[in-house]
Image (spheres, rainbow, N blue to C red):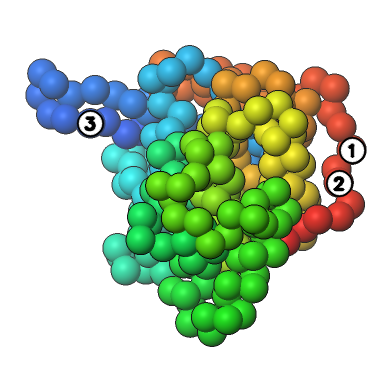
Amino acid sequence: MVIESERAVACRGVHKSYGQGDTRVAALRGIDLEVRSGELLMLVGPSGCGKTTLISVIAGILDHDEGTCIVFGEDLKRMTRAEKTAFRGRNIGFVFQTYQLLPALSAAENVAVPLFIHGVPRRSALERAATLLERMGMAEKRNALPAQLSSGQQQRVAIARSLVHEPRLIVCDEPTSALDRQTGERVMELLRAVAVAPGRSLVVVTHDVRIFHLADRIAAMDDGRIQEVSEAPERSPHPTSGVP
């Protein structure tokens, strides 16, 4: 049993539907899932089974209909919209599959956006962003606009943005989908290093079997339900350096 202090996320009986009446579609059908502090949990399953909906609920981006979702001891359902926004800003980094970069900002400025929001001085924020981009192999692209970057480069910028404010929970939707094998491994090693920092956790939605060995546990999902949670095969040692 995982004690409360070791639990980052606890979902119990979580339901989420879209639409009403005849058009109603049940995306989550009673999700029970725990994410432990200091672990990398991968969420796998066929397209359309509810994985993105689930991580959006955990990150406080979507409201669930029934059940409870407790993140770092806080019940998301009990928060006002303003409280939830502030909680996300302090505690959660989210990597969207569509990147959602701001087109008028450079790569470094996009990465630094969470720091700008928190009032970090511009120079310090951009220095922090440049350091992360260097770790992503993107140092020479820090002044490029999103339109000047490839899909893989945009993805790395989005990942760096999710890490820059050192959130306690990082949630990623297909973070290696646009990356080659070598770059994907490097990015996932950096993400994994974040996950083992004290009090942090990482949830990754992925179809990429090449990175399964980097997980601590893998949760298999289908038809809006968690089917099984198992230890990842061929677990590799956690990196000991490179934590942002």
| Chain-order first, disc 3 or disc 1 | 3
Please state the horizontal and vertical placement of residue 61, each as a whole percent of the image: 37, 50
Please state the horizontal and vertical placement of residue 180, each as a whole percent of the image: 65, 28
Q: Quadrant of residue 207?
A: top right
Give the residue at mark 3.
18
Tag 1 and tag 2, C-beta contact below 8 Å: yes
Q: Quadrant of residue 206?
A: top right
Q: Nearer the viewer, residue 177 or 58?
A: 177
Point 49% across, 66% down: residue:
109
Find residue 239 and name its label: 2
Mark pair 3, 1: CA separation: 41 Å
Mark pair 1, 2: CA separation: 6 Å
Mark 2 secondary-structure assignment? loop
Q: Is residue 110 left or right of residue 227?
A: left
Q: Is residue 21 above or below residue 244?
A: above
Q: Is residue 63 left or right of residue 44?
A: left
